[in-house]
Image: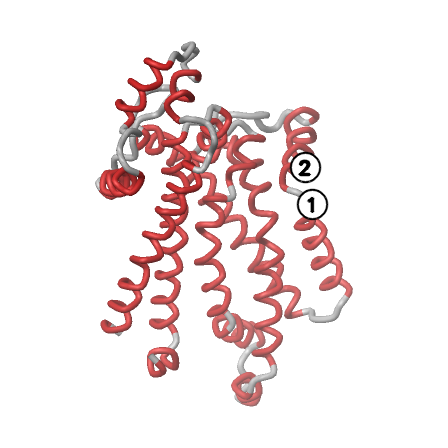
Amino acid sequence: MNRYLVKRVLAIIPMILGISFLAFVLINLRASDPAEIALRVNQVAPTEEMIEAMRVNLGLDKPYLVRYFSWLGNSLQGDFGTSYVTHDPVAYQIAAALPATLALAAVSLVIILTASIFIGVLCSVYEGSFADKVMRAFVFIGTAMPSFWVGILLMWFFSVKLNWFDTSGMERPSSVILPAVTLSLGFISTYVRLIRNNMIKNKNEQFVLYARVRGLKERTIIRKVFKNSLQVSITAIGMSIPKLVAGTVIVENIFAWPGVGRLCVTAISHSDFPIIQAYILIMGVLFVGFNLLVDILQKLLDPRMRKEG
């Protein structure tokens, strides 16, 4: 297990380097001069002398690879540069917006787990029944709707018509409900299908027949079947957590949620390159890190995988 862990950690190093280089390259492929943009976003009419001075100030006069390794080294120390617009450290802006995004993702994850387990178990217990078909159809239709459209519908009905929730912002704890429901709908169908299919498959295993022969209660058997069906779902959930964090971009902008996704969209509209680069790097590291965590968790939960490893 220790050898496997060392190999996996060493394997993610080139991946993170590749992500960082891709983030740096994509931003610098733009035809616009970052020095000129840094002047224009502050409503300064750029001249040749001012652009050249700004290039020196931003380090753009140095060779390409020197700039990349300098940015990478600073990023590893938590210094992502300074915003072109606010002139505040990028790390400070991301740290200020990150708690709102994590809160939204956490509430969404609770909704996903609660709804998926409840519906998935019911669908597997009443396999092929009318209730099974209705619940699956309802979930799949909800998942097929675009998140931006669902968010607007929820806002119109629950905020404008019923006046139950705020239309936007982070005014009170209940403000997170509509954005979280909107964000979670795209994931519920996946986990309902995973839980249902795995439970139906495990219901036909020999241990279920043996449990019934022993006279165990049906509730106990269902609990055992559910426990044996969790491995694939745990893997999928582990990979969905970074998707939840990254997927808040659209939802945060619909509900004016003050998170990292909204910060990134605002940075794109203002061509604030340091924030965009930091966002791409952080999201990439988040995906790679959770991929490693899920692999390790699988090894710990499944003795067969440890033996193969």
Which secondary structure lies at badge 1? loop
Identify the residue at the far right of this view. Answer: 130
In this rendering, the answer to whether 111 lies above or below 227 is: above
Is 137 positioned to the left or the right of 291 in the image?
right
* Residue 191 pos. (x, y %): 57, 60
* Residue 112 pos. (x, y %): 54, 51
Residue under numbered circle 1? 145
In this rendering, the answer to whether 169 lies above or below 27 is: above
* Residue 65 pos. (x, y %): 29, 43
Q: Nearer the viewer, residue 263 or 267?
A: 267
Residue under numbered circle 2? 149
The amino acid marked with disc number 1 is Met
Give the class, few, some or many, for how many residues have Cα within 10 Å of label 1's Cα (few <14, many ≥20). some
Name the quarter where the N terminus is drawn. Answer: bottom left
Going 63% across and 37% down the picture, which residue do you hit? 148
* Residue 190 pos. (x, y %): 59, 59
Q: Do the residues bearing badges 1 and 2 touch, measured as CB atoms within 8 Å? A: yes
Which secondary structure lies at badge 2? helix
Identify the residue at the far front of this view. Answer: 48
Give the class, few, some or many, for how many residues have Cα within 10 Å of label 2's Cα (few <14, many ≥20). few
The amino acid marked with disc number 2 is Trp
Is 119 positioned to the left or the right of 214 in the image?
right
